[in-house]
Image (spheres, rainbow, N blue to C red):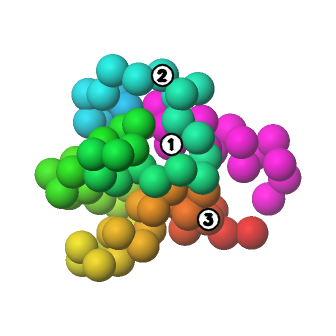
């Protein structure tokens, strides 16, 4: 995948997460490689957010997240999420 396409996907993911989980941050404030789960992250996603996002990712991108263990791996950062949605 080209760099610009990858950056476009990452920005789209940030916007989608912020809108879906009703967060009050901007996409620009979320780093591609920082954790997106937990109270220490800018997004501060919790288990309910993960469940909601799993449904959205399956519907929008066809990506099925099987369980909470896989969700922790897939949603580690914007980078890991983008790699799962659109592998190179």
Which mark's residue is nearer the viewer, 3 or 2? 2
From the image, tell me which residue sits under label 3: 83
1 sits to left or right of 16 = right
**Which quadrant is home to the C terminus?**
bottom right
Residue 83 shown in magenta? no
Query: Crowdedness of circle 1 by 10 Å Cα count: few (<14), some, many (20+)?
Result: some
Question: Going by the picture, which residue comes out furthest to the front?
Answer: 40
Residue 39 place in picture, x, y as percent: 27, 45
- Estimate the spatial distance between the alpha carbons at disc 3 and disc 2, rounded to whole Å: 22 Å
**Relative to the observer, which residue lies in front, 79 or 19?**
79
Mark 1 or mark 2, earlier in chain: 1
Dot 1: what SS?
Answer: helix
From the image, tell me which residue sits under label 1: 13
Mark 1 or mark 3, earlier in chain: 1
Dot 3: what SS?
Answer: helix
1 and 3 marks in contact (CB < 8 Å): no
Which mark's residue is nearer the viewer, 1 or 2? 2
The numbered dot on residue 70 is none
From the image, tell me which residue sits under label 2: 26
Residue 71 place in picture, x, y as percent: 33, 69
Residue 26 place in picture, x, y as percent: 48, 22
**Which quadrant is home to the N terminus?**
bottom right
Residues rendered magenta in the picture: 1-16
62 sits to left or right of 46 = right
Q: Residue at x 61, y 65 (%)?
A: 83
């Amino acid at each position: 995948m080209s760099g610009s396409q990858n950056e476009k996907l990452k920005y789209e993911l940030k916007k989608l997460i912020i809108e879906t989980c009703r967060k009050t941050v901007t996409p620009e404030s979320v780093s591609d490689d920082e954790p997106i789960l937990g109270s220490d992250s800018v997004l501060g996603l919790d288990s309910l957010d993960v469940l909601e996002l799993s449904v959205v990712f399956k519907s929008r991108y066809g990506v099925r997240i099987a369980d909470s263990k896989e969700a922790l791996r897939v949603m580690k950062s914007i980078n890991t999420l983008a790699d799962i949605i659109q592998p190179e």
